[in-house]
Image: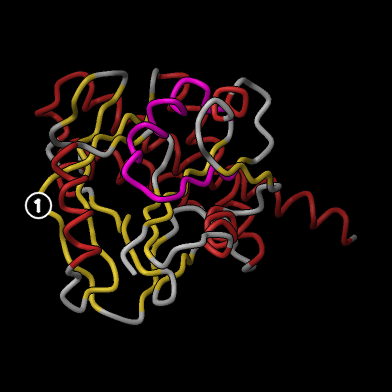
C-alpha cells in the first residue's frame, strides 16, 4: 500500500497551520495533533479536511508517537507546522512510497529561515531530519531533540523543504526557554548536577561552535544572533536544572 498519513503537531500555530496543511495536500490523510492551543490554530484547521486530535503535551516523542498510532496508513509524513514541503520534495515523496527500494524512511534536508531571512551557515547548512517513514519500522525517541529510531535503512531526498522556525527574535527566545525547561527536567530526572563547567565553559563553547566552526560569521548579524541565542539556551538549561535541584533538595530536608 502506498497511501500516506501526514501528521502535524501544533501548539498555537495560527500563523503557520493553513500553509502547513496545504503543504501536505498530497497526503491521503492529514492529522493535526494539538496540545490545547489557545489561539486560532484549531479554528483555522477545521476549515480543511483534516482529523484533529487533542492531547496534553508531555514530551515531543510521546506526542508524535501517539499521533502515529492513530494514523490509518503505513507511510507517515511528519511535518512540523513551521515547515513547508516544496514541489520538488513532494515529487520525491510520491516516488519513494511507490518504489522505496528497501528503505523504511527518508532524510530530507531543510532550508532554514530566521525572521524571514535565509540562513546559509551557522550549523544549519547540514540540517537534515527523517520526515517520511514506515510506521511499523520507525518510532521517535528522546525528550527534546527527538530522533527517529528505525529497524531498517534510511534513504535521502535530493531536494530540500523550507523551515521557517523562528518568526522573530522573541519567538526564538521563547522556544529556547521551552526547550531548556524540558531538557532541565530530563537531566534532573537522571540525577545530573550543575558545576562551573556547565555555566562558564559550555555556553561560550556553543557560541564559538556556531559562530566560528560552523561559519555563522558568514551569515552576518543573523549568524551572530543565532550563535548568541544558542549559547543563551545552554546557559538557561543549566540555570533551570540548578533551580530544580535546589527546589527538590529543600523539599527532601
Q: Can you say which quadrant of the picture contains the N terminus? A: bottom left
Please name the residue shown 22% across and 20% down the image. Answer: 117
The magenta segment is: 12-33
Please name the residue shown 18% across and 45% down the image. Answer: 89
Please name the residue shown 14% across and 21% down the image. Answer: 220
Q: Can you say which quadrant of the picture contains the C terminus? A: bottom right
x, y (%) of residue 44?
A: 55, 23
In the picture provided, is 188 more to the left or to the right than 148?
right
In the picture provided, is 21 more to the left or to the right than 130?
right
Give 200 or 138, whichever is nearer the viewer.
138
Q: Which corner quadrant of the image does residue 12 belong to? A: top right
x, y (%) of residue 130?
A: 30, 58
Q: Is residue 125 above or below residue 45?
A: below
Please give the count of numbered marks on the rendered protein. Answer: 1
Residue at numbered disc 1: 158
Please name the residue shown 35% across and 38% down the image. Answer: 25
Disc 1, SS: strand
Q: Which corner quadrant of the image does residue 102 belong to? A: bottom left
Give 143 or 91, whichever is nearer the viewer.
91
Q: Is residue 74 above or below residue 38?
A: below
- Name the image colouring: secondary structure
Q: Is residue 117 magenta?
A: no
In the picture provided, is 179 more to the left or to the right than 220?
right
x, y (%) of residue 192?
A: 59, 64
Q: Is residue 17 above or below residue 61?
A: above
Q: Which corner quadrant of the image does residue 40 belong to? A: top right
x, y (%) of residue 166?
A: 38, 26
Give 48 or 249, whichever is nearer the viewer.
48
Amino acid at each position: 500500500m502506498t497511501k500516506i498519513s501526514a501528521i502535524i503537531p501544533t501548539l498555537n500555530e495560527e500563523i503557520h497551520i493553513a500553509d502547513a496543511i496545504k503543504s501536505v495536500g498530497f497526503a491521503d490523510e492529514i492529522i493535526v495533533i494539538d496540545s490545547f492551543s489557545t489561539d486560532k490554530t484549531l479554528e483555522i484547521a477545521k476549515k480543511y479536511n483534516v482529523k484533529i486530535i487533542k492531547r496534553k503535551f508531555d514530551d515531543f516523542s510521546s506526542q508524535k508517537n501517539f499521533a502515529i498510532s492513530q494514523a490509518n496508513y503505513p507511510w507517515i509524513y511528519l511535518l512540523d507546522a513551521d515547515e513547508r514541503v516544496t514541489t520538488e520534495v513532494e515529487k520525491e515523496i510520491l516516488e519513494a512510497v511507490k518504489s522505496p527500494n528497501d528503505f523504511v524512511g527518508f532524510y530530507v534536508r531543510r532550508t532554514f529561515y530566521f525572521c524571514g531571512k535565509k540562513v546559509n551557515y551557522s550549523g544549519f547548512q547540514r540540517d537534515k531530519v527523517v520526515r517520511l517513514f514506515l510506521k511499523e519500522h520507525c518510532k521517535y525517541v528522546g525528550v527534546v531533540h527527538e530522533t527517529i529510531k528505525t529497524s531498517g535503512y534510511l534513504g535521502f531526498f535530493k531536494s530540500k523543504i523550507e523551515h521557517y522556525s523562528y518568526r522573530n527574535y522573541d519567538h526564538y527566545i521563547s522556544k529556547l526557554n521551552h526547550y531548556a525547561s524540558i531538557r532541565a527536567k530530563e537531566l534532573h530526572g537522571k540525577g545530573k548536577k550543575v558545576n562551573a563547567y556547565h555555566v562558564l565553559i559550555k555556553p561560550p563553547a556553543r557560541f564559538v561552535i556556531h559562530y566560528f566552526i560552523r561559519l555563522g560569521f558568514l551569515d552576518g548579524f543573523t549568524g551572530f544572533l543565532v550563535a548568541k541565542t544558542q549559547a543563551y539556551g545552554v546557559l538557561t538549561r543549566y540555570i533551570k536544572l540548578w533551580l530544580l535541584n535546589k527546589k527538590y533538595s529543600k523539599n527532601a530536608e
